[in-house]
Image (tube, rainbow, N blue to C red):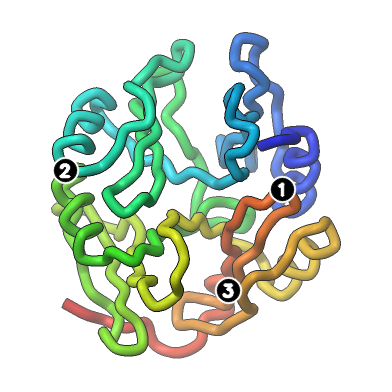
């Protein structure tokens, strides 16, 4: 973020987060909590990266960040910097898949990562929008071992969920965005109590509505661009309309 104080005000007002200052050695990093549990982080842009846009970054857990970084390179992705320790809380790196979709990897130590999800004001879903759908399947399977279930019709929507083998729940989704002519990106969805109300509130706070509100079998949803440019989605699962599609 260019302005972490402004981001603190925006997200704490929109999602009722309590945003706490990190220690001095954390370089201005802020931790957002909901009901006393970690919900998200807000960090300043690295020095010399002022032209980099503000973004939400999706992080995936790993037992060994170094091992995953090696797999990323072998599978054709790009590691922007080698894995490094973040104080005593974890080890991490930022990378991109072969098409350019950026993500983070977190090896937990003192900090396990997100501690609250699937409730209002908390993380709900992450999905990759990519013009290289089949290539993404292969890459993330090689790097993380994900398996996929197609739930789109392959005509109007090409979409799959992914999960680790034997997992009880899906880990997220992937969408073929080749028809949209947009760069690949990971989109974070936050659950809200009333999508229309959340979109209106975000607009009052200076955000712009990019898409929606739209109804779906998963909930009523919309996509926002925050005042500093980062894009994220909001969804109310209680407002779901229609049947959830099933696939192979």
Q: CA distance from mark 2 to mark 1?
A: 33 Å
- Quarter location, residue 75: top left
Front-most of residues 213 and 12: 213
- Is 198 left or right of 120, judged from the image as shown? right
Q: Nearer the viewer, mark 3 or mark 2?
A: 2
User: Disc 2 on helix, strand or loop?
Assistant: loop
- Residue labelled with disc 2: 75
Q: Residue at x 71, y 35 (%)?
A: 2
Q: Assess whether mark 1 and mark 3 are in contact (beta carbons under 8 angstroms).
A: no
- Give the percent coordinates (x, y) of residue 12: 75, 44
- Residue labelled with disc 1: 228
Determine which of the numbered discs, if any, sits on residue 1 in the image.
none
Pick out the residue farthest to the right: 204
Q: Assess whether mark 1 and mark 2 are in contact (beta carbons under 8 angstroms).
A: no
> How many residues crowd around disc 3 within 10 Å: few (fewer than 14), some, or many (20 or more)?
many
Instruction: Say which label, 3 or 2, has the lower sequence index.
Output: 2
Q: Residue at x 41, y 58 (%)?
A: 184
On screen, residue 142 above or below 29: below
- Residue labelled with disc 3: 221
Quadrant location, the C terminus:
bottom left
Q: Residue at x 38, y 17 (%)?
A: 84
Q: CA distance from mark 3 to mark 1?
A: 21 Å
- Give the percent coordinates (x, y) of residue 197: 75, 71
- Give the percent coordinates (x, y) of residue 207: 75, 60
User: Disc 1 on helix, strand or loop?
Assistant: loop
């Amino acid at each position: 973020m260019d302005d972490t104080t402004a981001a603190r005000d925006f997200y704490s007002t929109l999602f009722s987060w309590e945003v706490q200052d990190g220690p001095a050695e954390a370089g201005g990093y802020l931790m957002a909590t909901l009901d006393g549990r970690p919900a998200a982080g807000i960090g300043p842009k690295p020095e010399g990266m002022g032209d980099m846009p503000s973004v939400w970054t999706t992080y995936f857990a790993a037992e060994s960040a170094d091992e995953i970084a090696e797999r990323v390179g072998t599978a054709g992705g790009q590691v922007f910097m080698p894995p490094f320790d973040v104080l005593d809380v974890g080890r991490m790196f930022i990378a991109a898949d072969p098409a350019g979709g950026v993500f983070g990897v977190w090896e937990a130590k003192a900090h396990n990562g997100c501690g609250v999800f699937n409730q209002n004001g908390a993380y709900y879903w992450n999905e990759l929008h990519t013009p290289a759908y089949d290539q993404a399947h292969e890459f993330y399977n090689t790097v993380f071992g994900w398996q996929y279930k197609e739930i789109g019709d392959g005509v109007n929507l090409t979409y799959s969920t992914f999960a680790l083998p034997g997992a009880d729940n899906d880990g997220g989704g992937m969408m073929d965005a080749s028809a949209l002519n947009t760069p690949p990106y990971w989109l974070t969805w936050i659950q809200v109590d009333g999508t229309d109300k959340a979109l209106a509130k975000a607009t009052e706070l200076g955000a712009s509505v990019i898409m929606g509100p739209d109804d779906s079998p998963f909930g009523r949803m919309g996509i926002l661009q925050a005042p500093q440019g980062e894009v994220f989605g909001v969804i109310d699962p209680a407002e779901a309309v229609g049947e959830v599609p099933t696939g192979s």
